[in-house]
Image: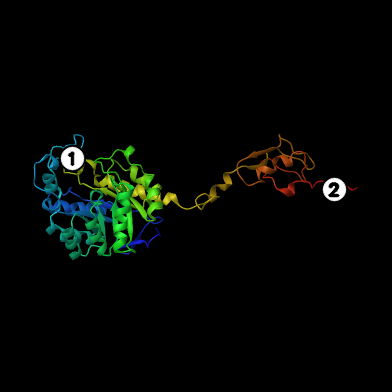
Amino acid sequence: MNRRKPMVINGMTIGQGRRPWVVAEMSGNHQQSLQRALAIVDAAADAGADALKIQTYTADSITLDCDRPEFMIDDPDGPWHGRSLYELYEEAGTPRDWHPAIFQRCRERGLVAFSSPFDVAAVDFLESLAVPCYKIASFEIVDIPLIRRVARTGKPVILSTGMATLEEITEAVTALRSVNSDLPVVLLKCTSAYPAPADAMNLNTIRHLRETFDVDVGLSDHTLGIAVPVAAVALGACVIEKHLTLSRAEGGPDATFSLEPPEFRRMVDAVQCAWQALGGLHYGAGEAERANKRFRKSVFAVQDIAAGERFTVENLRVIRPGNGLHPRHYEDLLGKTASCSIARGTPMTWDLVNPEPVTAY
């Protein structure tokens, strides 16, 4: 595939070589309180996020209210064990009549507001709110009709790849491109475990995704802490998405794997520092190092030396600072003679050395 045009959202270009774009995921951490949702928007802005993402679905649009085993969550190690899918999504869903207020607060706080739609009707609704981009969640990467509907909006798409095989990612990207070959796309490396252990992240996949699909790649992260996003940026991740909650102790369906505001602020600072540290290909003294070159070693007279006296290991040494001749000349100087008297502590220069006599034949 050929590299497509870069993703631009609300005037900001997103991609490798650019400052990482940090997305705060609200998900169900609003706990069915609009005031809490708006407080999360404020916390995201205060913590330095670039964008805030919500999820657009209803329990009825995403599943069935059914107690058959297929609709029950039976992962004993997960945060939702014993609940039905319908119960979970009824608690976690963001009511549609909240969307305008949340998006307006984001605009007031300088955040890009967007969403993950989970059905075609959700896309139509989000289009009525003029969202600038879309996120396809990991679980929806196999929903090809939904992906095609999102592609028809012509807006940038962020596609999460949790659990997806290479073939499934290829099918999803192909579906996007078949509708709009110029559509800006960013893939997110994701491990769909909640929380995700660090040793399950396989961040080296970021490079492979970038090379295979010739698109920019980011990270949707559900690990605890901030180390994994920093590592992802070092590998070229251009988007970092992380869940944000006001307080894990107050609970909520996603609280256990979400960051609190001070932690989110530390993550933002850390990923931006990691990106700055990448720099470019460089050798030699940089601007920050230039003043310290004087602390390198060079050749100095370490005893008083009379004119005509030979240089020896006793009266010459390679020491700091770097004001004298380069250390590579030290052995060449030994055995030569001083052209004048030299005081102890004098940096050696060639004019302090008698030239070699020329032998006539």
Q: Residues at badges 1 and 2 in contact (C-beta under 8 Å)?
A: no
Counting from the top left corner in percent of width and height, residue 106 is at: 22, 59
Q: Return the residue nearer the eye: 188 or 221.
A: 188
Location of residue 83 in the rendering, given as x and y in whole percent from the top left corner: 12, 40
Residue 249 tag number: 1
Give how far across and how far down residue 224 sits, in percent: 28, 40
Q: Earlier in the sequence, mark 1 or mark 2?
A: 1
Using the numbered discs, state the Cα–Cα distance from disc 1 to disc 2 in whole angstroms.
Answer: 87 Å
The structure residue drawn at horizontal position 29% and vertical position 43%, both measured from the top left corner, is: 191
In the picture, measured across the screen, residue 250 lies left or right of residue 304, that is left
Tell me the tag on residue 319.
none
Q: Which colour scheme is used?
A: rainbow
Q: Up-down: is 86 above or below 149?
A: above
The circle on residue 358 is: 2
Secondary structure at numbered mark 2:
loop
The front one of 215 and 23 is: 215
What's under tag 2, amino acid-wise? Val
In the orientation shown, which residue stands out farthest toward the right? 361
Three-letter amino acid code at the position of disc 1: Ala
Q: Which residue is drawn at 74% across and 36% down?
A: 312
Q: In this view of the protein, which residue sits in the foreground, 268 or 28? A: 28
Q: Where is residue 168 in the image (x, y as percent from the top left)?
A: 30, 50
Quadrant containing the N terminus is: bottom left
- Label 2: how many residues lie within 10 Å, few (<14), some (14-19) or many (20+)? few
Secondary element at tag 1: helix
Left or right: 17, with 312 as reference point: left
Q: Is residue 242 something one can see in this rendering? A: yes
